[in-house]
Amino acid sequence: MRMRVRGDGALGRAAKEAKSRAAAWAAGLGALTAAGAASAQDATLSAGDTAWMLVATALVLLMTLPGLALFYAGMVRAKNVLSVLMQCFAICGVITVLWVVYGYSLAFDTTGMVEGEVNLASFIGGFAKAFLNGVTRDALVLAIPESLFVTFQMTFAIITPALIVGAFAERMRFAALLVFSVLWFTFAYLPIAHMTWAGPGGLFWDWGVLDFAGGTVVHINAGIAGLVAAIMIGKRKGWPTTAMAPHHLGYTLIGAALLWVGWFGFNAGSAVAANGGAAMAMLVTQIAAATAALGWIAAEWITHGKPSVLGIASGAIAGLVAITPAAGTAGPMGALAIGAIAGVVCFFAATKLKRTFGYDDSLDVFGVHGVGGIIGALLTGVFAAAEFGGAGLAEGVTIGQQVGKQALAVGVTVVWSAVITVIALKLAGLFGGLRATAEEEQEGLDLALHGESGYNL
Amino acid sequence: MKMVTAIIKPFKLDDVREALSEVGVTGITATEVKGFGRQKGHTELYRGAEYVVDFLPKIKLEVAVTNDQVDRVVEAIANAANSGKIGDGKIFVYDLERVMRIRTGELDGDAL
């Protein structure tokens, strides 16, 4: 269902496969919706696909716990190390519950969706699958159990709000974070996921937007939320004049490494099958991560004189972010280009942009995920083209037109995410404020909000 | 008696210890310290954020010696700790009034 190569008479084998997958996905979901627990008549379970997706699902959860948690924990000061670990862990708990109650349904219920028609169901699913209604042992999506599809998608829903944590690290109240995460997940993540991935009749799906594994849904969405939240919540006390050096870059490197490995589940798993599309997604993921890591430290070496550990880790993540929407359509040469461009551009976004504009996006959620996501979304339109070794665009669609569609989806996501973030923060602030007090911030959130110290040496 | 205190670069500690053994010094106290002199600190860069670190790690050595040893000791430290680069450190010499070995109660020259 994430094979977003669409269209009639699609070019190339991958594209044909994609088309059939999309059709099968729509038929499968339709049958499920209509017949409740009954499995789709023509769908049969593939043991190979199921085995791979079980692994991929575990890999994507590994990205958040402990990957992202460690990536962030190493970048904060020692007095706040537990607070970011706690936030990532807590978000995992909260989103899991919400996903079961209504999240999966609002994202993937297809009731009322009509291909080519824009209605409410183009933006958000219904409640037909609330409390995982109909997700039985026998229910299938494509050739895998629906219970597995639910879990796979759940891990994406978990990592997205967890990414935002980096923008307001070291100053957000824990209670406010929980309220914000619930609201933002409900009104920003679920609709964008639905528009992109729920199938024919979804807004972005019908526009022909290519987003294989979540460039718009996950990274731009979270990146913009991070930027808005960093501005609204305000700078950390003392930023940027006080030294706020990362306290343990070893953690950060371990976290980045876990993210890198987990990303194979994220991107290659988004094929929802064990096939050539999944394998190519894995290959391009590896290539883009490597070239972006090299691009970042090259830029850093030239401008600052030394290549850094934080730089190479950040670069790898920037490349992984950028290849995410393109993983199903770009070829290896496209991945080289996407990675190199993302590594260099994100370096400048993270090192120059926030200082120029004076917002304290503590761990560069916008600089890496927002900027990397936008670069990736736009370049997906370029490198999907057969001329650049991609899987091929839909018939009659030029590169310019595809980039236009991509830009439109980026624009809608940016505005949607920004508006929802502002509202969600306003509401979250009603319950005792968004920020820890100046004294708590000085003491460190670990002790002030959680009653523990990260290090008792 | 004299107390010789030297601030040296950490990586020179082993060289200085050997040089002092060769001139007959039998006891040294070494402490990890931080400070700055003409070398000043250094800067660290994290995603473009520059932090100035004023205090650099050094080793402080304390060596109690007899009056006739002092010149040789100072010379030994100076030679062994010299890398020719800024930040090699300094040597201070003070008068030492009394010394007692705790185990035996020996005093002054006998206690060194």
Image (spheres, rainbow, N blue to C red):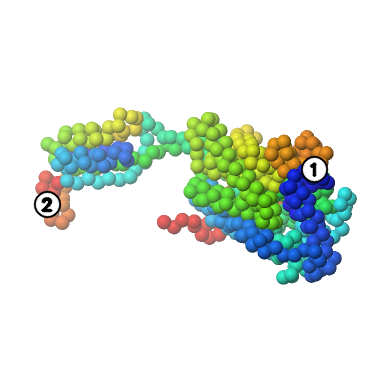
Residue A47 falls left or right of residue A406: left
Measuring from the top left, give residue A266's x and y in whole percent: 65, 53
Q: Which mark is residue B106?
A: 2
Quarter of the figure that contains the N terminus of chain B: top left
Q: Is residue B45 above or below residue A452?
A: above
Q: Nearer the viewer, residue B12 or A193?
A: A193
Residue shown at 54% from the left, 40% from the top = A311
Q: From the viewer's perspective, tell me whether residue A424 is left or right of residue B9.
A: right
Q: Is residue A89 visible?
A: yes
The kind of residue tagged 1 is Ala
- For the image, the number of numbered tags is 2
In front of the other: label 1 or label 2?
A: 1
Q: For mark 1, does the 10 Å Cα neighbourhood hold few (<14), some (14 to 19), or many (20 or more) residues? A: many
Quarter of the image where one finds residue A404: top right
Q: Quick one: SS at disc 1? A: loop
Which residue does the image show at 48% across and 37% down from the upper left? B44
Query: Which residue is labeled 1 in the image?
Result: A394
Percent position of residue A17, x then y: 75, 51
Q: Nearer the viewer, residue A281 or A304?
A: A281
SS assignment at label 2:
loop
On whether disc 1 and disc 2 are found on a single subunit, the reply is no
